[in-house]
């Protein structure tokens, strides 16, 4: 019988056990790499990366992950493909499936990754859409586990800022993995209602959206933030700066959290906007470990998606 193709388009696609096994495996792969162990199960495999938005971390960490696993990478900017001249996604997906073993996609609409996955015989992995950033959330949770332990249920996690793709992936992670999540977002910039209500219906802990950042971070163990204007929202950036200023993660806000709280930022950061220089470079920040962990998580995701251990 033909095995099902392992796409990963949003956190809600995977069950709790699979998410935890990816997190555990990423930590093991990180240890193996630090010990200098060669592990090249992707030898002879080719990963395609189709990107239509800028990327430093996701692009290079997926490339490094695939190379370190022994495989090769073909990077495709959308503007260079026939896709950009009108070739349908379904044709692109079927053709790329004949050349590649896995495809990472960074794009605007979630419907693009869904359509590619529908027509693809190889795993399609979401490397960020306007709605979700599901691989990033795994590296973020891995970073939390490294700092605070594997049991997340006793942690208070806060999100401060835009109810964007990152916030929505955190909401799905809270529901699947089981931890309380408090989001402070300006009015009109809250996460999607449907994503929220679905997550709440399966969550064992509160997932609350509020307008007060102080209430959201009160006694928090983990504080997350992200840019105020995401890719594709550049024209709104000036307006957003005015609305979001009270949502800056700074030393004054951190005083309301637990003294040993950690601060996450998926990067790129805009110092002086969503986060201050002092906080990003200060003792609570784990942003650099978080960035490194993207590579280890991507190794685990690639290994799982391509069934390199099955
Ligand atoms: N965090 C993240 O996805 O960064 P890039 O946009 O640089 O890939
Ligand atoms: N919310 C940001 C995340 C960047 C990694 C964006 O979509 O631009």
Image: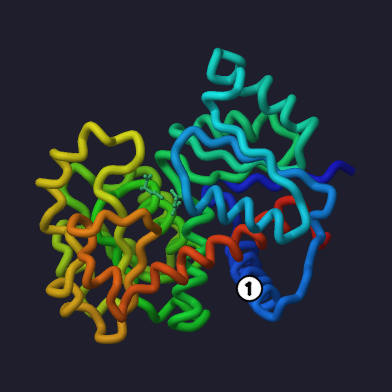
- Dot 1 lies on which element? helix
Q: Compare residues 248 and 2 and report the one nearer the observer.
A: 248
Q: Residues within 10 Å of mark 1 (few under 14, many from 20)?
A: some
Pick whichever, 58 or 215, lies toward us.
58
> Percent from the top left, x then y, of residue 9?
56, 44
Query: In the image, residue 270 lies at what x, y percent?
Result: 26, 54
| Quadrant (top left/top right/bottom left/bottom right) for the N terminus | top right
Residue 265 lies left or right of residue 24; in this view the side is: left
Q: Quadrant of the C terminus?
A: bottom right
Q: Residue at x 68, y 20 (%)?
A: 91
Tell me where residue 93 appears, x and y as whole percent.
Answer: 68, 28
- Would you say 36 lies left or right of 268 here? right
Residue 212 percent coordinates (x, y): 14, 62
Q: Quadrant of residue 33?
A: bottom right
Q: Residue at x 63, y 65 (%)?
A: 22
Residue at 53% from the left image edge and 19% from the top image edge: 84
Q: Which residue is mark 1?
A: 30
Name the residue nearer the viewer: 202 or 254: 254
């Amino acid at each position: 019988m033909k095995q099902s193709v392992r796409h990963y388009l949003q956190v809600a696609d995977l069950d709790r056990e699979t998410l935890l096994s990816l997190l555990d495996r990423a930590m093991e792969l990180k240890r193996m790499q630090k010990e200098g162990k060669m592990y090249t199960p992707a030898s002879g495999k080719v990963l395609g990366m189709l990107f239509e938005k800028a990327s430093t971390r996701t692009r290079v960490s997926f490339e490094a992950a695939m190379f370190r696993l022994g495989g090769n990478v073909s990077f495709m900017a959308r503007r260079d493909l026939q896709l950009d001249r009108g070739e349908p996604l379904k044709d692109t997906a079927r053709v790329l499936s004949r050349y590649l073993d896995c495809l990472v996609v960074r794009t605007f609409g979630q419907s693009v990754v869904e359509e590619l996955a529908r027509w693809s015989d190889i795993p399609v992995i979401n490397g960020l859409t306007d709605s979700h950033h599901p691989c990033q959330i795994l590296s973020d949770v891995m970073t939390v586990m490294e700092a605070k332990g594997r049991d997340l249920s006793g942690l208070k996690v806060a999100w401060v800022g835009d109810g964007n793709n990152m916030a929505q992936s955190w909401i799905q992670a809270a529901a699947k993995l089981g931890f309380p999540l408090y989001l402070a977002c300006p009015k009109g910039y809250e996460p999607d209602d449907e994503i929220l209500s679905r997550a709440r219906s399966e969550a064992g802990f509160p997932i609350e959206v509020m307008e007060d950042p102080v209430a959201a971070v009160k006694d928090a163990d983990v504080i997350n933030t992200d840019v105020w204007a995401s890719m594709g929202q550049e024209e709104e950036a000036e307006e957003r700066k005015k609305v979001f200023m009270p949502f800056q993660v700074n030393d004054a806000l951190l005083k309301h959290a637990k003294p040993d709280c950690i601060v996450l930022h998926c990067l790129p950061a805009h110092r002086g906007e969503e986060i201050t220089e002092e906080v990003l470079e200060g003792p609570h920040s784990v942003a650099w470990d978080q960035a490194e962990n993207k590579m280890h998580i991507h190794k685990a995701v690639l290994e799982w998606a391509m069934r390199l251990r099955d």
